[in-house]
Image (cartoon, rainbow, N blue to C red):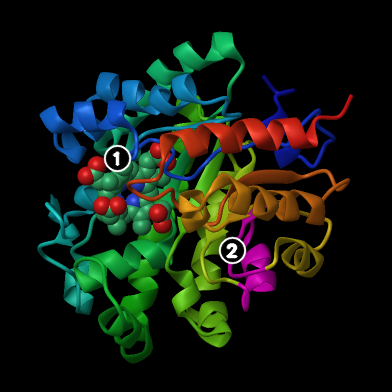
């Protein structure tokens, strides 16, 4: 297993072909997922270890992927802190009691992930039993402090993130306490996932590109670093991902991560130049490119692969999660093509 393409690439070792997995590879674009989802809410899928394991395996059975990612979400850990989470139909996630004051934040618990998130840890144990005979590694994940804070303070998705940014600027003591609690939980949750069997861990800082470099450095970097330092005690590769991060790549790398995930708004080879030799990279096809004709898509995939050719430590992925309505046939062809095109004798 340690010799799998994916884990070798995380360690920047040479591989026989470029490993590929796709963020949110289990989801609504797959008919198998929609069939299970018709009978269960997303939280029911996540909280049933058997169903979460089954969903995790759906893309593994459909495509020649080099890694699985446990089916879960970044938001259930917030429930264990005392926040009330709902995935509302057509609206995305809602937190019914967002935190806005120091008193709100003082009242948040930092739960033991083994108690509060035992369902995902059990799903990891079940999934490893299915993946082990096939030699496919399993990725665990957590939301990063800023992205989690964004949901906890805004109360859901947000266009301008006015509430979370003003809390950050106006109430530094409240911010410090919130981010310390989130970083501690994220770090400990990642460690628990590795102990349950996850062979790599990804920290999703999906919305961090909304911040200026100065604000990232002052208000976020120390806490992502804390989460990754705690996670690092597990001894498995850490992937540190964000979108819109072209302006903060060195700071992200400073916060930590063996692999840095970048989106399509940044040229992958230039990103790697900026990051230096100490890290591997993951990315970075535009998820919308999967809606193009194959003849238009293939050169985009080739360009990414060519740009980092011969440099060990590239994991092919999208620049962000796969979108609903993505054609399944294109996903299959993409995964096969990445292997074919990069195969070394
Ligand atoms: C920001 C974020 C969330 N969740 C996640 C992030 C970080 C990654 C990213 O930036 O995309 C992470 C996540 N969420 C989900 C996974 C599954 C694992 C995988 O297969 O990759 C992962 C890795 C399942 C999910 N989580 C969600 C779905 C779709 C909902 C459904 O089945 O109804 C899935 C498959 C719901 C979710 N969860 C979240 C939102 C905003 C939504 C609603 C938006 C939407 O509807 O697509 C929060």
**Residue 75 at least partly seen:** no
Dot 2: within a 10 Å radius of its alpha carbon, few (fewer than 14), some, or many (20 or more) residues?
some
**Residue 46 at least partly seen:** yes
Dot 1: within a 10 Å radius of its alpha carbon, few (fewer than 14), some, or many (20 or more) residues?
some
Q: Determine if the C-beta at disc 1 is less than 8 A from ligand 1.
A: yes
| Extent of the magenta region | 246-266
Q: Is residue 27 left or right of residue 317?
A: left
Q: Which residue is mark 1?
A: 28
Q: Residue at x 26, y 23 (%)?
A: 51
- Please tell me whether residue 343 is drawn above or below residue 283 in the rendered image: above
Pick whichever, 140 or 242, lies toward us. Answer: 242
User: Tag 2's secondary structure?
Assistant: loop
Q: Residue at x 50, y 37 (%)?
A: 331
Indicate the quadrant where residue 26 lies.
top left
State the image coordinates of residue 72 (x, y, percent, origin top left): 33, 38
Q: CA distance from mark 1 to mark 2?
A: 22 Å
Q: Which residue is mark 2?
A: 264
Residue 262 part of the magenta-drawn span: yes
Marking on residue 302: none
Q: Residue at x 32, y 69 (%)?
A: 150
State the image coordinates of residue 240 (x, y, percent, origin top left): 58, 55
Pick whichever, 147 or 326, lies toward us. Answer: 326
Q: Quadrant of the C terminus?
A: top right
- Please tell me whether residue 307 is drawn above or below residue 153 in the rendered image: above
Q: Residue at x 50, y 24 (%)?
A: 197
User: Tag 1's secondary structure?
Assistant: loop
């Amino acid at each position: 297993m340690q010799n799998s393409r994916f884990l070798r690439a995380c360690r920047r070792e040479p591989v026989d072909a470029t490993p590929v997995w796709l963020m949110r590879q289990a989801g609504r674009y797959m008919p198998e997922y929609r069939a299970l989802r018709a009978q269960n809410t997303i939280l029911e899928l996540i909280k049933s270890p058997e169903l979460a394991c089954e969903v995790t395996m759906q893309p593994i059975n459909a495509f020649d992927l080099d890694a699985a990612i446990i089916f879960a979400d970044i938001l259930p850990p917030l429930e264990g802190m005392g926040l009330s989470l709902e995935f509302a139909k057509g609206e995305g996630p809602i937190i019914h009691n967002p935190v806005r004051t120091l008193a709100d934040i003082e009242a948040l618990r930092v739960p033991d992930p083994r108690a509060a998130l035992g369902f995902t840890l059990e799903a990891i144990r079940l999934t490893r039993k299915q993946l082990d005979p096939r030699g496919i590694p399993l990725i665990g994940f957590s939301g990063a402090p800023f992205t989690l804070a964004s949901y906890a303070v805004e109360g859901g998705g947000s266009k301008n993130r006015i509430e979370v940014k003003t809390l950050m600027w106006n109430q530094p003591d409240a911010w410090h306490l919130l981010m310390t609690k989130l970083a501690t939980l994220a770090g400990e949750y990642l460690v628990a996932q590795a102990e349950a069997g996850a062979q790599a861990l990804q920290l999703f800082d999906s919305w961090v590109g909304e911040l200026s470099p100065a604000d990232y450095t002052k208000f976020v970097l120390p806490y992502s670093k804390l989460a990754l330092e705690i996670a690092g005690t597990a001894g498995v590769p850490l992937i540190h991902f964000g979108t819109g991060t072209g302006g903060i790549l060195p700071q992200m790398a400073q916060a930590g991560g063996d692999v840095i995930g970048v989106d399509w708004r940044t040229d992958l080879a230039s990103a790697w130049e900026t990051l230096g030799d100490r890290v591997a990279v993951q990315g970075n096809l535009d998820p919308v490119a999967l809606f193009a004709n194959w003849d238009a898509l293939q050169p985009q995939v080739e360009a990414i692969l060519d740009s980092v050719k011969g440099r060990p430590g590239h994991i092919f992925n999208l620049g962000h999660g796969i979108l609903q309505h993505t054609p399944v046939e294109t996903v299959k062809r993409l995964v096969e093509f990445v292997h074919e095109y990069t195969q070394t004798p």
